[in-house]
Amino acid sequence: MDTANTTAGHEAEPVRPRQAVILAGGRGVRLRPLTDDRPKPMIEFHGRPFLAYLIEMLRDAGFERVLLLLGYRAGVITNYFSDGRDFGIDISYSISPPDDLTVRRVQLARDQMESRFLLLYCDNYWPIRFDDMWSRYWALGAPAMVTVYRNSDGYSRNCIHVDAHGMVDAFDRSRTAAGLNGVEISYAILDRSVLDLLPETDAPIEEALYPQLAASRRLSAYVTDHRYYSVGSPERLPLTSEFFARRRVVLLDRDGVLNRRPGKAEYVRSWEEFRWLPGAKDALAMLKSAGYRLIVISNQAGVARGAMSAADLDDVHLRMRREAAEAGGAIHAIYTCTHDWDEGCECRKPKPGMLFQAQRDFHFDLTRAVFIGDDERDQAAAEAAGCNYLHATERDGLLPLAEMLVKAEGHQLCAHN
């Protein structure tokens, strides 16, 4: 598309894409013998193929149509999904020889693609936040936008550089260039016109398309710290299985949710100053009994400010966890930011760093988790991480929120049975 004609001022009512195009034709050689009789996105986790999780996520994100570009053992996919009716979404197909690369597959299916669409690889699952992505795509004004994992944990090898303005200025599929700062995971919003840049010779589409777009500053990035999960290599399968177990997770602020909040710029400096809020221990027990994993996320600048030592804080948390367990609850992990207010760290709420660290450690989906906090910093951190948020007050306490979550989970289970 012509970026000069695609600003909000030139197109008053942009329509978000409703079609997703999934590249799913490769042989999956690295996954043999698992792929001897099926394409890699049909490898099962907890009794369901990887591709089913992906398609259902797209449906829940508001997509209405999926176009699958198939090759190797295409019949396994078409027989399972058919026209998509059983999955609540319209599914169509383009099938070409197994050894075609992705430029060829896209060229053959181009007439089936809508004016704007979401392009995905079949082997990456990332919890999509499409409304947020679409807002960024429109604000940056480029005809193409890829999703980039920041990779601060060294989960993979970087292949892309995103500049300070959110534009991609380098794409290196060999992953050898200096200064790369992220991993391109697809989830790309494309205007169909960019396909005019594809060569006649076959190649991987990202290698053929993205460097050209980057060179002309027509490729933007949506950067995320939420880990993606893959069926692309054997070493990733155990993590993906853990992620798709979909264990229920509640994230909890501490002061004002579990214990009485001290005064402004004051801290719980020792166990003697810690006071459980009424009903808090009962709430922890109820949530544990319902199968929730409970993780505390807490700012504790008192350490950096000299009000207490790290050992003092550890002692408070040791005793807090012990009393929670004695009451029938369980706190699985505690994340604290002990930096001072103005140190500029990535972990102090309202920044979402601790939430993302917990996600990576425990392999859960933040978009399915709940963060319970008691002030605007908690809510801002939850929103930045794409996490659901519930507000607790010292007057009403944690218990009513726990009861609501358990009741809601019960209704969901009944609906699925």
Image (cartoon, rainbow, N blue to C red):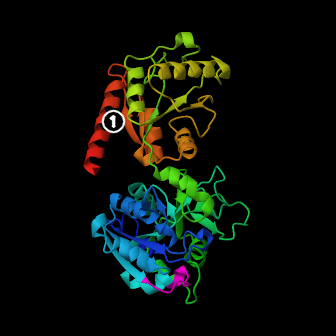
Magenta segment: 95-104
| Residue 163 appears in the figure | no
Q: Is residue 101 magenta?
A: yes
Residue at screen point 54% across, 84% down: 100
How many numbered badges does the structure rendering display? 1
Residue, x 41% and y 74% (percent of image)? 77
- Observer-nearest of 187 and 46: 46
- Report the residue at 55% width, 90% height from top: 200
Q: Is residue 149 above or below residue 403?
A: below
Amino acid carrying label 1: it is Leu
Q: Is residue 415 left or right of residue 172?
A: left
Q: In the picture, residue 272 is in which quadrant? A: top right
Q: Secondary structure at mark 1?
A: helix
Camera-nearest residue between 167 and 301: 301
336 over 87 or under it: above or below? above
Residue 315: image x %, image y %?
Answer: 61, 18
| Residue in front for this viewpoint, 319 or 359 | 319
- Quadrant where the image shows the N terminus: bottom left
* 118 drawn magenta: no
The percent position of residue 275, horizontal first and vertical second, equals 47, 13
Question: In this rendering, does residue 89 appear at all?
Answer: yes
Rendering quarter of residue 413? top left
Q: Would you call the spot at circle 1 few (<14 residues within 10 Å), some (14-19), or many (20 or more)? A: some
Q: Is residue 299 above or below residue 81?
A: above
Which residue appears farthest toward the bottom when viewing the image? 200
| x then y, percent, for residue 386 | 44, 47
Q: Position of residue 416 (x, y in %)?
A: 29, 50
> Quick check: 414 left or right of 346?
left
The residue under label 1 is 405
Question: What secondary structure predominates along the stretch shown in magenta?
Answer: loop
